[in-house]
Amino acid sequence: MINIIGLGYIGLPTALMFAKSGVEIVGTDLNEKLIDSLSRGKLTFEEEGLEELFDAAIESGIKFTTEYQKTDTYIIAVPTPYINSSKKLDPKYVIAAVNKVLDVCEKGAVIIIESTISPGSINKYVRPVIQGRGITIGEDVHLVHAPERIIPGNMIYELENNARTVGADDTAIGEKVKELYSAFCKSEIVVTDIRSAEMSKVVENTFRDVNIAFANELAKICRADDMDVYEIIRIANKHPRVNILQPGPGVGGHCISVDPWFLVGDYPDLTNLILTARKINDSMPAHILGRIRDIMTEHNLTDISKVGIYGIAYKENVDDTRESPTLQLLEKMDEHLAYGVKVYDPFINERIVDHQFMNFEDFINEIEILVIITAHDHIRDNMDTVKGKLILDTKNICNFEGVYKL
């Protein structure tokens, strides 16, 4: 039996995939409301294919509880935020989970940490906790880091088809865990040491952050001198060795917008490029605020309540709002005393911000300027409805004249 700890965006799909594959699974989370919902057969977030996977896992006998189980295998998938002041990893959730596992686990248990952590975190935080309790690593318990590699909106496919990394002290334990994940993972599973596994995951997301920052900086340069950044990127990408990404309103989610800070926090004197990239991407909500001001000035508009922001989720076709560019933009507006901007997202079914609309038509009827932050399929399907508005399209999805871009 595997006890999976933490049933959020990573832990729950992983638990369901294991269960569907015939592995005995107990999912544990301290959130009683979440456990009650799952036990009643109700999912806690939307994801394409997740409901079908949930039904299959229920049929296979998956169980949900707030209690840690006595078993020989654990997968820890708890949040790993960073400390804002230092940019270092905040390991409190991982440490708490490890301690609770140690309270109940069988001798020789394998503790697999899936949560993304900064390089060296297991050495700095996890090993001392275990050793401080008089427990011998390699005999009483075994440590493994198998970082998750999935993204909301494509979780099911990526669980099955993305390559995986398993970092272990003992190669034999690493191979055992590799076989475990092979129950559903069809792609290559690489076995390496723990620090290499830690670093590789953070490097993957940092690479993407730096490349997004390059595109966003290009957008600012082109805006400053009245050039079309999208046309320039289109032409440049015809070179066989050039692949510039598209600029956007900022970087959200719990991976790309967070993981690079781990390197900045741990290696402040060595991360000049990474820090600059983070600053560029974090500056995009302020850039959008400036573009909104430009449009209002051009059209002699003074009422901020006539501005509507489409999209709260950080990416298209999901309900995940973690580190959302829209939330960052609203914070910037609040700092500038710009109150009353209206907000709508078809995937967010609860009011989480002020002046949030739950009906699209009502939202559109109340605004004059539409700011597209998230390129949900819903807005693509409703272009005819919004054509009469002043539109700031930060995702380059509007293909008609008169639209403002980044």
Image: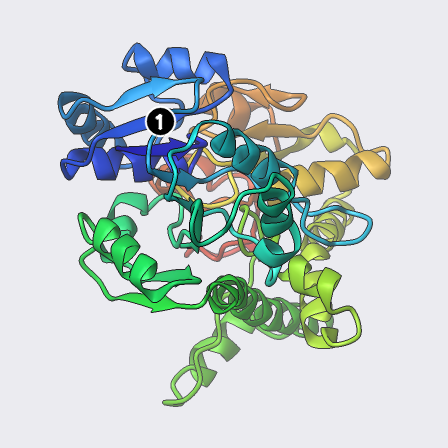
Tag 1: residue type? Answer: Gly
Which of 376 and 200 lies nearest the eye of the viewer?
Answer: 200
Classify residue 392 as left or right of residue 223.
left
The residue depicted at 46 percent of the width and 40 percent of the height is: 77
Image colouring = rainbow
- Where residue 241 sits in the image (x, y, percent)? 41, 89
The residue depicted at 18 percent of the width and 22 percent of the height is: 61
The residue depicted at 37 percent of the width and 26 percent of the height is: 70
Q: In this rendering, is residue 195 above or below 308?
A: below
Residue linked to disc 1:
27
Residue 59 occupies which quadrant of the picture? top left
Quadrant in the picture for the N terminus: top left
Q: In this rendering, is residue 104 above or below 399?
A: above
Q: Is residue 237 visible?
A: yes
The residue depicted at 49 percent of the width and 66 percent of the height is: 246
Q: Can residue 301 be seen in this view?
A: no
Q: In this rendering, is residue 224 above or below 346?
A: below
Which of 24 and 378 lies nearest the eye of the viewer?
Answer: 24
- Where residue 83 sits in the image (x, y, percent)? 74, 46
Quadrant in the picture for the C terminus: bottom right
- Where residue 394 sits in the image (x, y, percent)? 56, 53
Give the mark count: 1
Classify residue 81 as left or right of residue 33.
right
Which of 190 and 216 lies nearest the eye of the viewer?
Answer: 190
